[in-house]
Image (cartoon, rainbow, N blue to C red):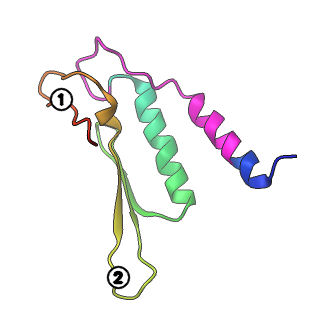
Amino acid sequence: MSSPLAERLTQRFFRYLAISSQSDPRATTLPTTPGQHEMARELAQELRQLGLDDIEIDEHATVTAVKRGNVPGGAADRLYHPYRYRRRRAIAGHPPADPAL
């Protein structure tokens, strides 16, 4: 018998898996496919549901969000999802991805 948490995680996994976000090696734009923007929108929606603030998606499908600190005077952490760094080759006008990211 699966736990409710395991069920939710499995559903989330399959929801992301259903999005066709594979890059197009012939593309000259970032992101290289519409599915990459769709993946970014799905991630942004999930971050909203988790209570994060200042969620933004830029023209390259990069998602940023702020997780407010819960300690008075504490710093807020900024989450950065560098979706465009998944590419393995340079695209005209864009530097190659840093594999360390």
Q: Name which residue lies at 30% across and 34% down.
A: 84
Classify 70 as above or below 87: below
Classify 80 as above or below 101: below
Mark number for residue 96? 1
Q: Are marks 1 and 2 in contact (CB under 8 Å)?
A: no
Q: Residue furthest right?
A: 1
Does residue 62 appear to the left or right of 15 in the view shown? left
Q: Is residue 24 magenta?
A: yes
Q: Counting residues from the N terminus, which is met first, the one under dot 1 or under dot 2? A: 2
Classify 40 as above or below 45: above
Q: Name which residue lies at 47% across and 34% down.
A: 38
Magenta span of residues: 9-31
Residue 88 point in image, percent of width and height: 28, 24
Placement of the C terminus among the 4 image quadrants: top left
Q: Residue furthest top?
A: 26
Give the amino acid at mark 2: Gly
- Give neighbour class at mark 1: few <14, some 14-19, many 20+ (Cα, 10 Å): few
Q: Which residue is mark 2?
A: 74
What secondary structure is found at the residue carrying circle 1? loop
Quote the CA–CA distance across marks 1 and 2: 35 Å
Give the amino acid at mark 1: Pro
Is most of the magenta stretch helix, strand or loop? loop
Q: Name which residue lies at 26% across and 35% down.
A: 99
Does residue 50 appear to the left or right of 79 in the view shown? right
What secondary structure is found at the residue carrying circle 2? loop
